[in-house]
Image (spheres, rainbow, N blue to C red):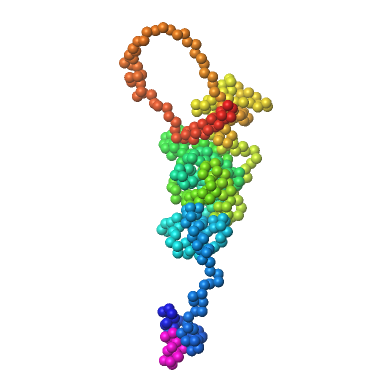
Amino acid sequence: MSQEQLKRYTVIEKTLEGSMTIREAAKHLGLSVRQVIRLKKGVEERGAAALIHKNRGRKPAHAIPDGVKETIIALKISDKYKEANFKHFQELLERFENIKISYSPLYKILKGAGIQSPKKRRRFKPHRRRKRKAQKGLLIQMDATPYNWFGDGKMYSLHGAIDDATGEIVGLYMTKNECLQGYFETTRQMLLNHGIPISIYCDRHAIFLSTKAGKLTIEDQLEGKVCNDTQFGRAMKELGITIISARSAMAKGRVEKLWDTLQSRLPVEFKIAGITTIDEANEFLKSYIPQFNKLFAVEPENPESAFRPLSSNIDLDSVLCVKQKRKVDSGGVFSFYGKHFKVEPKENQPYIPPNTYTNIFISSISGVRVEYNGRIYETVPFVKPKKAAERIPKEHKATTYTPPDNHYYKYGQSLLRRVTFEDSDRDILDMLEEIFLGKYKKLA
């Protein structure tokens, strides 16, 4: 018997002896008078056994079988599910192992076996949360995070966009590094699947905001000097999307919380699906986004969506691309970052006049294209033939040449600046290299 049951037995014995009334016993035990009468009658008939619950020592009918518990523990410590947190593991058991169990008993089983969840909880820090936007599409939070997604020690960047009102993922795309292409493809998913949002909330990365922004003095502004848009900023301006720059990671907390969740779940999902490359991951993410939204998305305060439908006359390949101006020579050839391309007009397209400045569109999806007078021209990589110099061999004596004192060799290195590319050009160079090599191989 427990100490509580012994106390009850002692008090009931006093009522049987007549040294304590039933009302006094009820007050001491914290029970009703009716319950004390029932206990007194049971002790008179069966003794102290009447105070012991009849189910004591018996296994509940709805208890989880020991075999199922052992199976759950064995699955959790296996390589397949070892890195999954308890909540994610509960979902995986139902999806792949046909074991449906509530979170509370699952937690007790795993904790009783000495298994700790790999996702540790930080100490709660009270802070004032910003209220969600009322409508879907009013504000999209966009960011990228590098992480060891495949468990091979290599870091890849996952670009993502999440709706502020619902917490719904509207785009995910993985690349080797955080780059313009990753944000363009994330935006493409959002535009095709949801529409055009009102604004995008992002950090102050050079992809979103020029490094010269905020450095213009009052005198510069009075003179009319402005800071040019980045390629991403120019594309959003063409679509009518406002870019809002956050000054801290905490300001865009919803997308930061999204990374915490995905870094816990996606590596396990990739391992189960046998995904080890970026291309496989991007294909998998297309079907994973609806599953994630079904679990974590919430209903907005206002059910009416603020997303604007994407017009059919908008060519996304001509918007989500890098745009620059180049001069086309008489042969329809132009150079772009050290590579040469040749314009190939179609049957119904007129030739571009020589020495004409045109707009160059470069994209990882559509390649390099030319825009002139509202018409889009396709291009192909072009290798200029080298001119064979006709040289007449001359007999000459080998002499030692000593440069004069005013020669560049002696003083000029300190006067000429080394030509380098800026960090903002690195994405363009990488994208151009892939397009040029890919098309050149096809032509060969």
- Which quadrant of the figure has residue 199? top right
Residue found 51% across the figure and 56% down from its top: 88
Most common secondary structure along the magenta stretch: helix
- Judge whether residue 245 can be spotted in this image: no
Residue furthest right in the image: 348
Residue furthest front in the image: 67
Residue furthest top in the image: 395
- Judge whether residue 100 can be spotted in this image: yes
Residue furthest bottom in the image: 18
Count of residue discs = 0
Q: Position of residue 94 (x, y in %)?
A: 56, 58
Which is nearer the eye, 221 or 240?
240
Residue found 46% across the figure and 50% down from its top: 251
Residue found 56% across the figure and 46% down from its top: 284
The reply to whether the magenta stretch includes residue 13 is yes
Residue found 63% across the figure and 23% down from its top: 351
Q: Is residue 80 above or below residue 196?
A: below
- Which of the image's four quarters has the C terminus? top right
Q: Position of residue 192 (x, y in %)?
A: 61, 44
Q: Position of residue 280 (x, y in %)?
A: 55, 43
Q: Position of residue 422 (x, y in %)?
A: 44, 33
- Which of the image's four quarters has the N terminus? bottom left
The reply to whether the magenta stretch includes residue 61 is no
Horizontal arrangement in the rendering, residue 20 relative to residue 314 (left or right): left
Q: Is residue 10 above or below residue 174?
A: below
Horizontal arrangement in the rendering, residue 391 relative to residue 293 (left or right): left
Q: Which residues are magenta?
A: 9-22
Which is nearer the eye, 197 or 13?
13
